Image: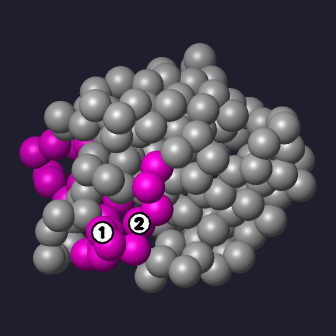
Amino acid sequence: MLNKTDILDVFHNSLIKSGYNNVEHENSRIEQFELFKIDGLHELKLHIIAKNITKSGWIDKPLIRRVQIGPIQSTQLPVSTLNESAFILGVIKIIDKYIFTVWSVYENFSHNTNRSCYVKIPNLFKAYIDGYYKCEDSSQMIWISDESNLNKLIFDYLTFNKTTLEK
């Protein structure tokens, strides 16, 4: 399992591997979040909660993994646009690749206690094999990619969240 610094380094390096340049990491103004600024064709600001993907804690459900987060202050979250958004990022190493799963923070802030975000192992392996996979898992849309396809994951996530805010 990676410590927080290692998770952030792996994410930073994978952004570069996915084709992003000029990636900077700093503390976010939002409690629990880290901020990644990306300068390129257009500027991106990604506020992330970064966690290891771990076992779900359920003995009878061995194919489910999770990240666990604490309460989030929704009033601190940015309005999700194509240039700025926030998400929950889970990281797991499968064989020789880091696999990233993203959950919408906008669907996971209405709680006062710890909250778990789930992903099934077969979905992680689909992203391992194909490089990128999005699906509904445990009643939530999730985005999963390997280190080389974060650009697809981020684009789809930003597009999805911008669209849902405009409904």
Quickly name the residue at label 1: 74
Element type at mark 1: helix
Image position of 104 (left or right of 115): right
Residue farthest toward the left in the current orientation of the protein: 60
Is 109 part of what is drawn in magenta? no
Q: Horizontal and vertical percent for residue 115?
A: 21, 65
Question: For this rendering, which residue is in front, 146 or 38?
Answer: 38
Magenta-colored stretch includes residue 74: yes
Residue type at mark 1 is Ser
What secondary structure is the stretch in magenta mostly built from? Answer: loop
Q: Position of residue 154 (x, y in %)?
A: 59, 38
Count neighbours of disc 2 (C-alpha within 10 A) and say few if under 14, some if 14 to 19, many if 20 or more: some
Give residue 51's position: percent from left, percent from top: 47, 64
Report the span colored magenta: 55-80
Quadrant location of residue 61? top left
Q: Which mark identifies residue 77?
A: 2
Q: Is residue 139 visible?
A: yes
Quadrant in which the C terminus appears: top left
Residue 93 visible in the displayed image: no
Q: Amino acid at mark 2?
A: Leu
Which residue: 76% across, 50% down? Answer: 43
**Are discs 2 and 1 less than 8 Å apart at CB?**
yes
Above or below, comparing residue 161 to residue 56 in the picture = above
Residue in the picture at 38% in, 47% down: 103
Residue at image location 18% in from the left, 34% down from the top: 139
Q: Residues within 10 Å of mark 1 (few under 14, many from 20)?
A: few
Kind of element beneath mark 2: loop
Which numbered tag is attached to residue 58? none
